[in-house]
Amino acid sequence: MIATSQPGQPARLAPGRTAAGRRLPGIGRVSLVRGVVEIKQFARQRENVIFTFSLPIILLLLFGQIFHGEVGNSGVSFRQYFIAGIIASGLMSATFVGVGVSIAADRDDGALIRLAGTPLQPAAYFAGKAILAFVTAALEVAALLAVGVGFLGLHLPSTPGRWLTLAWVLVLGSATCSMLGIAVGVLVRSTRSAFATMNLPYLVLSFISGVYFVFSRLPAGLQHIAAIFPLKWICQGLRSAFLPDRLLVAEPAHSWEHGKIALVLGIWLVASLVVCVRTFRWHRQGDR
Amino acid sequence: MSAMADMAVPTSQAGTTGQARATSQAGTSSQAGTSIRAAAPSEAAQCAIRVRGLRKQYQGATAVAGIDLDIERGEIFALLGPNGAGKTTTIEILEGHRRRDAGEVSVLGADPARADRAWRARIGVVPQTQTRTGELTVREMVSHFGAYFPDPRETDKVLDAVGLSKQAGTRLRRLSGGQLRRVDVAVGIVGRPELLFLDEPTTGFDPQARRRFWDLIAGLADDGTTILLTTHYLDEAATLASRVGVLAGGRMVAVGTPADLGRTDADSTNDADSTNAAGGTGGTDATSTVSWRAADGMRSVRTATPTQCVLALAREAGTEIPGLTVTRPSLEDRYLELIGASENGAER
């Protein structure tokens, strides 16, 4: 802020350094900046952190108290069966609901309008949300596994292959749910309606996707509906990481269907990305 | 309406050569706020903003009804007008945040409706709505916005400029309204913009904060930043702006320097002619108000020749004239007159 003009000289016509000659920051770097900002903002809202992490842990402990015995005569406890569903449910809550609500909040508190005035790409903004969603989901899984192993006698994935399955299902699942959260969150009018709007699909899907019930025991009609949406496939992928192959009898297809899981989640990921890019506006929808 | 427009845009007779005048005034205008450089620039290349016939409707209601506007590089231009006059709609169209229905718009040589990221990196925006909450610190907020730009200013220097150095480590939600508004300004300038849009930047400031803000804006202009601001505050426009445009009912009812707008027809067209309307009372030509205390209470006369009037009063009184004041119409008087005329016109 150094005044460079001297009396009598048209110094105003010579602006300082112009941005024109310099390169815009790359999307990778800006995405990381966004990710860090998102994580800081999330981590500093204590209530938000507590609710996000405590809900699935409480669910896990409740299930641990309610369900005893094993699935059929497989020797696998119900608790072990449901850990996959609860992780999937927690993942969708942290990503889909969390991202949708945070977009509404960004809109309400003026953050989006401010970002609109910068060269930030919407894709980098989305990436920041996805980074936060992934970090939250990973921490949540770690917390659930710690509680499950420590208090409920659950077993961790038994082979490196199953850990790998856990990893890719988490990454793909949280990316898909984040993008879906953005796509739906764009439609939300305000933070007040965001929780209701985002939780309705989340809760319905939780009930029909094998989170609270053994999936193959649901009515066939509900199974077919659930199979359209990502949560069923995330649950199935996680079961394949936590359950032994002898439980394949409890799967409708009698297979973990890894290819199909990747395909369905991939289609949802790409479709929601397209919807996000097409419909996302920094400004509130309306007469613009 | 046409008479107003003629009055508002000074003709080249007013100075010797327009260019030389602009040059000589450029260095002082930000401090004095009374630059008389007002002639519309002839070269498009010099224009930061060029608007012709801009129109915008919302569901049938006209928000902007055909605006022309030229803003030179390095200029501080203030858009004045009542609520609903079309200020924010206009500025949002220029920022590329709103579509227009008709008209030509060029901002830094590009159409904002089709502008790319490189163009966006050259402008800074301080929207009307204020940041409401935030868990980031002031420094984090400003520096992460800087990261979106190719050549950002140093965060600490920006914080210093807006007077938030002490609050650098404070979370946004702990700031006062005026401090949050300064964060908005910091975010608007951290990208080193060539052109800065400020939509009612000082609403909610105390007088001292407003003074500091004016210094900041004047400093940015001295650095070569072109500034377009909207404001409700006439003193702000008069202090800061090299030119002022008055919007009413979606139309630009007057454009000129704050000093020009304060004058009336008689002043701007007949500066040297003091022989007519001597001692005139009232009437549209009257420019100044002479008031004094007479035996029967306060008296006042509107006159184009206040000196003559005072001399006459002095002769009459033979001594000090009690309670003498001579006031020229301020920008505010002229502004209210323009707004009033526009409203009457709309009703007809």
Image (cartoon, coloured by chain):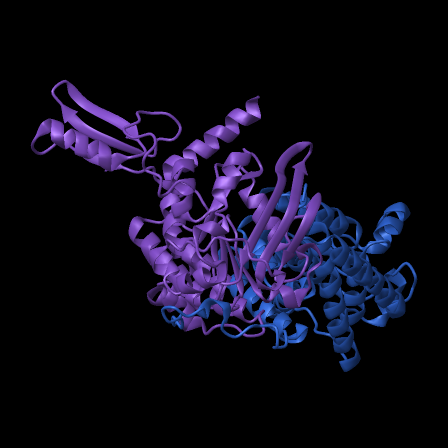
Q: Nearer the viewer, residue A130 or A256?
A: A130
Which quarter of the image is occupied by the N terminus of chain B?
A: top right
x then y, percent, for residue A130: 67, 65
Q: Is residue B168 visible?
A: no
Residue under the point 33% across and 29% down:
B277
Residue A139 occupies quadrant: bottom right
x then y, percent, for residue B269: 43, 41
A163 lies above or below A286: below
- Left or right: where does residue A250 sit relative to residue A83? right
> In this structure image, what is the colour of chain A?
blue
x then y, percent, for residue A158: 75, 77
Q: Is residue B184 visible?
A: yes
Residue B260 occupies quadrant: top left
Residue under the point 67% across and 37% down:
B57
> In this structure image, what is the colour of chain B?
purple
Q: Nearer the viewer, residue A106 or A249?
A: A106
Q: Nearer the viewer, residue B161 or A35?
A: B161
Residue under the point 24% across and 31% down:
B290
x then y, percent, for residue B47: 58, 60
- Left or right: where does residue B337 sit relative to residue A48? left
User: Quick one: which residue is furthest to the top in this view?
Assistant: B296
User: Quick one: which residue is furthest to the left in this view?
Assistant: B319
B198 lies above or below B4: below
Which quarter of the image is occupied by the C terminus of chain B?
A: top right
